[in-house]
Image: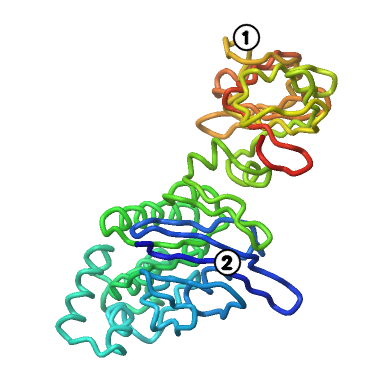
Amino acid sequence: MAGVRVSTLTKAYGPLTVLQDISIEVAEGEFTVLLGPSGCGKSTLLNAIAGLDEVDGGTIEIAGQDVTDLEPAQRGIAMVFQSYALYPTMTVRGNLSFGLKVKGSPRAEIESRVAWAADLLQITPLLDRKPGQMSGGQRQRVAIGRALVQKAKLFLFDEPLSNLDAKLRTEMRVEIKKLHKELGLTIVYVTHDQIEAMTLATRIAVMKGGRIEQYAAPDELYERPETLFVAGFVGAPAMNFLPGMYRGGAIEIDGVRIPAGALELRGPVADGTKVVLGVRPEHIGLVADGALGESVAAEAQFMEPMGADTLGWFTMGSHRVSVRLAPQRARGVTGNVDLALDLSLASLFNATTERRL
């Protein structure tokens, strides 16, 4: 039975449609991330699942029950907000137990659940502190603990790490991933950070303009993006896009013919089709280093050190491309070079429809 099933959901604010015929299914125990830029509808979809926003059409099921018209408290959910939303006058113990007290849970059960969550999140020493006496990371642990003690059917996270610094975000990602693995929680998680999505999710729904562009496992999104938008949004640094024309089994880019035989095409492509060749920086190498693939002439522009590797920027005709290089190798790359494009790992898109070919 699905943890969550959303069917043909629509939502508008006056003339502005923010959710357009959304259908998505989250299996029990799955970690689904709603990923996209600001204004794409991801938070609105999460709020609709939570019951915080009414919808104009479609249905929402949680654990097999139609909850479309139910109040949030009747849906069996627990939510973690971006702003922590802790009661500043209550201790950690008070924040963790408040929801259970409101529900009328027995005192012994409340104490047991609070102790369990505090131990799991390593916040037992903080139980008698108030939120103002804690760091952002500690407050976020408390917010997660407040959700965990509810023993809900579904956990909803609304950009919970966006207020933390980079180091704390990395630490909290590990903790959330660990919690999901240990407890088998069903989670729907909203973020605009594609690295966060890739590291946490079992499946990612990439959203744009109130629609889901692609819903798939992180590896599939990265290796076989269905649209130009997904290809450009997922991956850091971004995929290289080379517009051209498909003709005679080759892609013509600025007068250079690149044989397309190594590409995994889904079907025949008509001659004269305007296309966009997408190649990730790690799938381009230097012919001089023995890299395999279709060879093209390029000119080195500048190198961008990134620590473990260096991003080399080259011009290929009128286009700029980025290439992942070992730092030691990048220091000696200048002038004209030959680049090898591994087309077996590349993507080809129709330039008009922006769909994968």
- The extreme left residue here reads 108
Q: Is residue 203 left or right of residue 297?
A: left
Q: Is residue 273 left or right of residue 207?
A: right
Determine the residue positioned at 38% across, 87% down: 89
Marks 2 and 1 in Cβ contact (< 8 Å): no
Image quarter in which the N terminus is found: bottom left
Name the amino acid, label 1: Ala
Q: Can you tell which of label 2 and label 1 is closer to the viewer?
A: 2
**Image coords of residue 288 (percent x, y):** 62, 9
Q: Is residue 163 above or below residue 278?
A: below
- Judged from the image, the secondary structure of the residue bearing numbered disc 1 is helix
Determine the residue positioned at 55% across, 20% down: 328
- Judged from the image, the secondary structure of the residue bearing numbered disc 2 is strand
What numbered label is drawn on residue 8?
2
What numbered label is drawn on residue 288?
1
Determine the residue positioned at 62% across, 52% down: 213
Q: Is residue 241 above or below residue 248?
A: below
**Image coords of residue 77 (percent x, y):** 38, 74
What numbered label is drawn on residue 326?
none
Q: Is residue 197 left or right of residue 107?
A: right
Name the amino acid, label 2: Thr
Instruction: Say which of 170 and 268 sits in front.
Output: 268
**Image coords of residue 310 (percent x, y):** 59, 29
